[in-house]
Image (cartoon, rainbow, N blue to C red):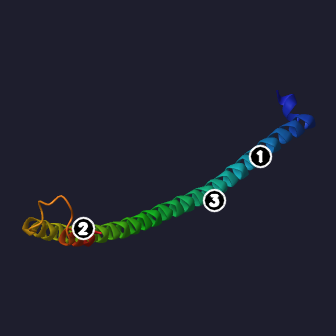
Amino acid sequence: MLALLTNKWTWRAASVVVLGLLVAVALGKAFNAGYGTAAAKYQAEIAEIQRATAQADADELRRQTIANNAAKKREAEAIAQLEAEQASNDELRRKLASEARQDPDADRPVLGAGSVQRINQIR
């Protein structure tokens, strides 16, 4: 055993092994450091994409809310207009029905001038 320690080739072989181990450790640390840097970079990119996606979702939700509220307003205005027209038509029908009941020629088989005027008011 003592002879191995005094042999120069043994020392050279041991030095090569130790040097190889040091190189392997250095490369491993460099790889891990590079991996950590890349991981941090991509995590930052993913966080930015998630933030942009959340912002786009919020913007789209806001746009849809505005569009829905505008549509509801137009619908309410259209309904109010239709109700006003219906009330006007109901009043006209009541008026014309009352005039038709009071028409002395209502039981005749032909239309008189008053009946024609009432029909023309409906158009």
Residue 116 figure quarter: bottom left
* Residue 115 vertical position relative to residue 24 in the rendered view, above or below: below
Residue with the most extreme top position: 1
Q: Which residue is mark 1?
A: 22
Q: Circles 1 and 2: CB distance less than 8 Å?
A: no
Residue closest to the eye, 86 or 77: 86
Instruction: Please name whichever residue, 120 or 1, is drawn nearer the observer in this view of the structure.
Output: 120
Q: Which tag is nearer the camera, tag 3 or tag 2?
A: 2
Q: Kindly identify the residue that appears in the image at 19 percent across and 68 percent down.
A: 112
| Amino acid found under the numbered disc labelled 1 | Leu
Q: Are marks 1 and 3 in contact (CB under 8 Å)?
A: no
Is the residue marked by circle 3 packed among few (<14), some (14-19), or many (20+) residues within 10 Å? Answer: few
What label does residue 119 carry, if any?
A: 2
Q: Residue under circle 3?
A: 41
Quadrant of the rendering where the C terminus is positioned: bottom left
Tell whether label 2 touches label 3 (CB within 8 Å).
no
Classify mark 2: helix, strand or loop.
Answer: helix
Is residue 96 found left or right of 24 in the rendered image?
left
- Percent x, y for residue 25? 73, 46
Give the x, y percent position of residue 28: 72, 46
Out of 57 and 46, give the one closest to the viewer: 57
At 81% across and 42% down in the image, what residue appears?
A: 20
Residue in front for this viewpoint, 47 or 40: 47
Q: Is residue 59 left or right of residue 72?
A: right
Q: Give the structural element (helix, strand or loop) at label 3.
A: helix
Mark 1 / mark 3, whichever is N-terminal: 1
